[in-house]
């Protein structure tokens, strides 16, 4: 057991990938068998991750969830800023501006409108709950854009860890709502063709939520919605710590 423990500790990142892989497999299995695909596997995986983080923190008295358990310390690196930023850059390199033109003017407008509306709603809720610091309001507003834009913005403008966590929670709630709600409203909003999928992806923006929701609606629409949703994330990461932060700072 000592040998196994030593090997696992020395290869903590490999262990982290294995643990996440098993979690993903279980999540997609549950999504398929229990919900018939209505709730996407990624939503269940995120929920399991939050539960594990809670019990990991309670068990160890630490503040980084399961990463405080020595055996799972690699999850702290895997879920840290380095991997997140790498994923964002990788996604950005996989998208070409020529593809965005296929969405037309409506697709472009939907991206900026989606980012701004989501940010305003998130920032307004932050103010309603008593936040007056510009960095906190901006970070929570950015989290309402997506749970990627929130941490990127928060770290760039110096928000506290607690506020960054709230921004992730806000984006997570939005993602799950989009996952579940898309197939329910698709018929009523004409979400049955590539053009409408592009506009929908630009308005909602949460790539995981849009992809999962469209997969439950019509798998053929997923690439179109995911394409504009990816641009949405990039635009949010650009506007959050710059223009939107300056505007909030001017008000507060």
Image (spheres, grey):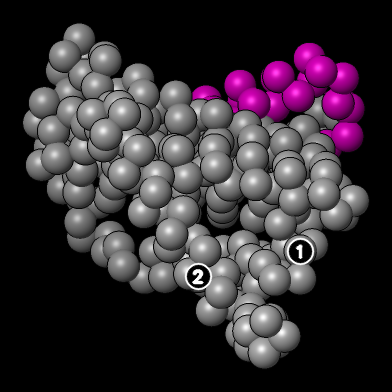
**Residue pictured at 77% horizontal, 33% vertical:** 137
Task: Give the Cα separation between the discs numbered 2 and 1.
Answer: 15 Å
Span colored in magenta: 116-135
Q: Position of residue 78 (x, y in %)?
A: 60, 69
Question: Which of 14 and 220 lies nearest the eye of the viewer?
Answer: 14
Based on the picture, tell me whether residue 50 belongs to the magenta stretch: no
Q: Position of residue 82 (x, y in %)?
A: 63, 72
Q: Position of residue 157 (x, y in %)?
A: 78, 53
Give the quadrant of residue 224: top left
Q: Describe the element under mark 1 as helix, strand or loop.
A: loop
Task: From the viewer's perspective, tell me whether residue 156 is left or right of residue 203.
Answer: right
Label 1 CA crowd tier, 10 Å (few <14, some 14–19, many 20+): some
User: Compared with residue 189, is residue 173 higher up or lower down, i.e. above or below?
Assistant: below
Question: Which of 148 and 172 lies nearest the eye of the viewer?
Answer: 172
Q: Position of residue 3 (x, y in %)?
A: 67, 89
**Which numbered disc, 2 or 1, marks the residue closer to the eye?**
1
**Residue pictured at 61% horizontal, 21% vertical:** 121
Question: Which of 191 and 11 lies nearest the eye of the viewer?
Answer: 11
Label 2 CA crowd tier, 10 Å (few <14, some 14–19, many 20+): some
Give the quadrant of residue 36: top left
- Quadrant location of the C terminus in the rendered image: top right
Looking at marks 2 and 1 on the same chain, the residue that comes earlier in the sequence is marked by 2
Q: Is residue 106 visible?
A: no
Question: Which of 226 and 195 lies nearest the eye of the viewer?
Answer: 226
- Residue assigned mark 2: 17
User: Compared with residue 22, is residue 118 higher up or lower down, i.e. above or below?
Assistant: above
Task: From the viewer's perspective, tell me whether residue 234 is left or right of residue 247.
Answer: left
- Residue assigned mark 1: 69
Q: Are marks 2 and 1 in contact (CB under 8 Å)?
A: no
**Residue pictured at 14% horizontal, 40% vertical:** 219
User: Which SS does the magenta portion mostly show?
Assistant: helix
């Amino acid at each position: 057991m000592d040998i196994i423990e030593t090997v696992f500790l020395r290869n903590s990142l490999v262990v982290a990938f294995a643990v996440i892989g098993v979690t993903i497999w279980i999540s997609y299995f549950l999504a398929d068998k229990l919900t018939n695909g209505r709730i996407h596997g990624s939503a269940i995986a995120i929920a399991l991750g939050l539960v594990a983080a809670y019990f990991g923190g309670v068990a160890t008295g630490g503040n980084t969830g399961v990463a405080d358990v020595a055996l799972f310390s690699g999850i702290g690196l895997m879920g840290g800023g380095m991997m997140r930023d790498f994923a964002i850059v990788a996604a950005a390199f996989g998208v070409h501006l020529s593809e965005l033109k296929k969405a037309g003017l409506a697709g472009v407008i939907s991206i900026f409108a989606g980012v701004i509306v989501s940010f305003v709603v998130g920032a307004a809720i932050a103010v309603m709950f008593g936040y007056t610091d510009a960095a906190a309001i901006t970070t929570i507003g950015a989290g309402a854009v997506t749970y990627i834009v929130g941490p990127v913005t928060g770290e760039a403008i110096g928000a506290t860890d607690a506020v960054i966590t709230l921004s992730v929670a806000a984006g997570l709630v939005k993602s799950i709502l989009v996952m579940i709600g898309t197939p329910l409203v698709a018929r009523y909003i004409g979400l049955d063709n590539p053009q409408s999928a592009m506009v929908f992806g630009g308005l909602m923006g949460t790539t995981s939520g849009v992809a999962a929701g469209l997969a439950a609606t019509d798998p053929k629409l997923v690439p179109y919605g995911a394409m504009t949703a990816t641009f949405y994330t990039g635009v949010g990461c650009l506007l959050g710590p710059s223009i939107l932060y300056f505007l909030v700072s001017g008000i507060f």
